[in-house]
Amino acid sequence: MLLFIKRLFAWWDGATLGTLFTIFKHGVKVGEDDFGNVYYEEKKPGIYNQKRRWVIYKGYADASRVPTEWHGWLHHTFENPPTISPLARKDWEKDHQPNLTGTIYAWHPQGSLAKGGHRPHATGDYEAWTPASAQDGANS
């Protein structure tokens, strides 16, 4: 019962029942990426003679978790999915990584509030600014 309710309302974690029904009725599975996301395409072309394409995220729905080759296919940049025509990779290209900003895995510099807010003391090359009105009051 809990899974049913989650599927009704939790669009950010997997797919809703409406999306699953639409894909079941009109879609065909095309492939899956290394992150576990599953990709679908409409069986028959719709408006503008183009087939709609979907991704069902494994876990939290975050577009930055879609690798380059699948992103291009989803947006009709590539006609064939990477399962049929893999995207050629250069030697210098790194593996795709999702954007971790806003997650618990995001990088935080030393001294940030997310790391406890402690930073090293100034080394002596820093002089604090004091407003002119405070300086005038001190000189009186």
Image (cartoon, grey):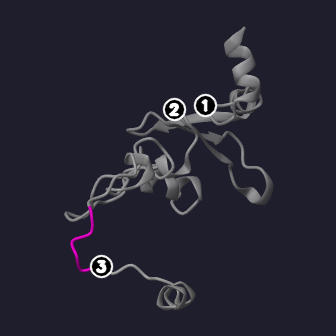
The secondary element bearing badge 2 is classed as: loop
Q: Are marks 1 and 2 in contact (CB under 8 Å)?
A: yes
Residue 102 visible (yes or no): yes
* Residue type for callout 1: Gly
Highlighted range, magenta: 121-126
Q: Nearer the viewer, mark 2 or mark 3?
A: 3
Q: Is residue 102 above or below residue 4?
A: below
Tag in front: 1 or 3: 3
Quarter of the image where one finds residue 18 = top right
Question: Please, what is the dominant secondary structure of the magenta stretch?
Answer: loop
Residue 5 at x, y percent in the picture:
75, 18
Mark 3 residue element: loop
Q: Position of residue 118 (x, y in %)?
A: 34, 52
Label 2 crowd (10 A; few <14 / some 14-19 / many >=20): some
Q: CA distance from mark 1 to mark 2?
A: 6 Å
Q: Which residue is mark 3?
A: 126
Question: If you read the primary sequence from the N terminus, does the residue marked by circle 2 or circle 3 appear first?
Answer: 2
Instruction: Name the residue beneath numbered marker 2.
Output: 58
Of residues 119 and 131, the one nearer the viewer is: 131
Within 10 angstroms of label 3, few (less than 14), some, or many (20 or more) residues?
few
**Which of the two discs, 1 and 3, labels the residue nearer the N terminus?**
1
Distance Cα–Cα, label 2 vs label 3 = 49 Å
Residue displayed at 59% across by 59% down: 76
- Judge left or right: residue 74 versus residue 5: left
Q: What amino acid is at disc 2? A: Lys
Q: Please give the name of the residue rendered at 72% of the width and 49% of the height, measured from the top-left corner.
A: 45
**Secondary structure state at the residue bearing disc 1:** loop
117 versus 55 height, above or below: below
User: In the depicted view, which residue is nearer to us: 106 or 90?
Assistant: 106
| Quadrant into which the N terminus falls | top right
Q: Which label is found at residue 14?
A: 1
